[in-house]
């Protein structure tokens, strides 16, 4: 259980505590079960409500908590807001471009520099032509389809949910 003591969030109680009367107590953390009223008297307020709605860190920002201390418990309030649309679009665009590059790299990965040394000039030129054509196909799809869909997405959720299927190369 979490507690609030002096405006700070504690995830556990201390093992030893000096009470307000000056006496030190070991095993203080066990008071949670044995004497919860004494904990409150010592200023340890149990957190009974955490207003912490689910949020999606990809498209939202959570701030807080704001701590409200009552006489017998504390409440932690978090605020969830959408990230700015421009930032969500920029991150999605970067991710999609990385996917396109990965598709090209996966197809042409086995044709590294060592493999090229064993190719004739005509084979190498043919491979370069095919690679360039595949890059042009994916680039064209990105420019004509994905960028249009991304421009039409008017909320961070719509940006996240953007669907597309890369053409087969």
Image: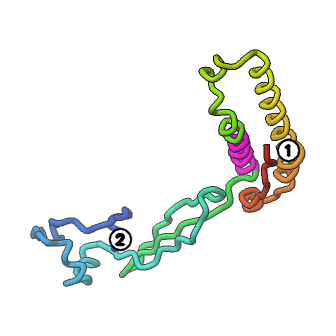
| Type of secondary structure dominating the magenta stretch | helix
Q: Which residue is nearer to you in this view: 161 or 74?
A: 161
Q: In the image, which disc is placed on residue 2?
A: 2
Q: Position of residue 48 (x, y in %)?
A: 41, 79
Q: Position of residue 75 (x, y in %)?
A: 45, 74
Mark 1 Cα within 10 Å, few/some/many (few <14, many 20+)?
A: some
Find disc 1 in the rendering and name its residue: 141
Q: Which residue is nearer to you in this view: 3 or 88?
A: 88
Q: Which residue is nearer to you in this view: 51 or 146?
A: 146
**What is the magenta range?**
86-100
Q: Locate the N terminus and report the quarter of the image it occupies.
A: bottom left
Q: Residue at x 62, y 21 (%)?
A: 113
Q: Is residue 59 left or right of residue 9?
A: right
Q: Position of residue 6 (x, y in %)?
A: 34, 64
Q: Quadrant of residue 140?
A: top right
Q: Is residue 50 left or right of residue 168?
A: left
Q: Residue at x 65, y 19 (%)?
A: 118
Q: Quadrant of residue 159?
A: bottom right
Q: Is residue 104 left or right of residue 39?
A: right
């Amino acid at each position: 259980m979490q507690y609030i003591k002096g405006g700070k969030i504690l995830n556990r109680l201390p093992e030893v505590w000096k009470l307000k009367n000056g006496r030190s107590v070991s095993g203080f953390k066990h008071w949670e079960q044995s004497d919860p009223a004494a904990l409150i008297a010592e200023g340890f307020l149990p957190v009974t409500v955490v207003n912490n709605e689910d949020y999606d860190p990809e498209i939202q920002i959570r701030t807080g908590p704001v701590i409200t201390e009552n006489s017998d418990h504390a409440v932690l309030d978090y605020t969830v807001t959408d990230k700015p649309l421009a930032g969500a679009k920029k991150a999605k665009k970067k991710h999609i471009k990385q996917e396109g590059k990965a598709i090209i790299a996966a197809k042409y990965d086995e044709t590294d520099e060592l493999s090229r040394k064993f190719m004739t000039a005509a084979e190498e030129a043919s491979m370069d032509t095919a690679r360039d054509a595949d890059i042009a196909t994916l680039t064209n799809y990105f420019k004509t389809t994905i960028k249009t869909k991304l421009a039409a997405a008017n909320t961070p959720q719509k940006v996240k949910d953007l669907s597309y299927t890369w053409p087969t190369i």
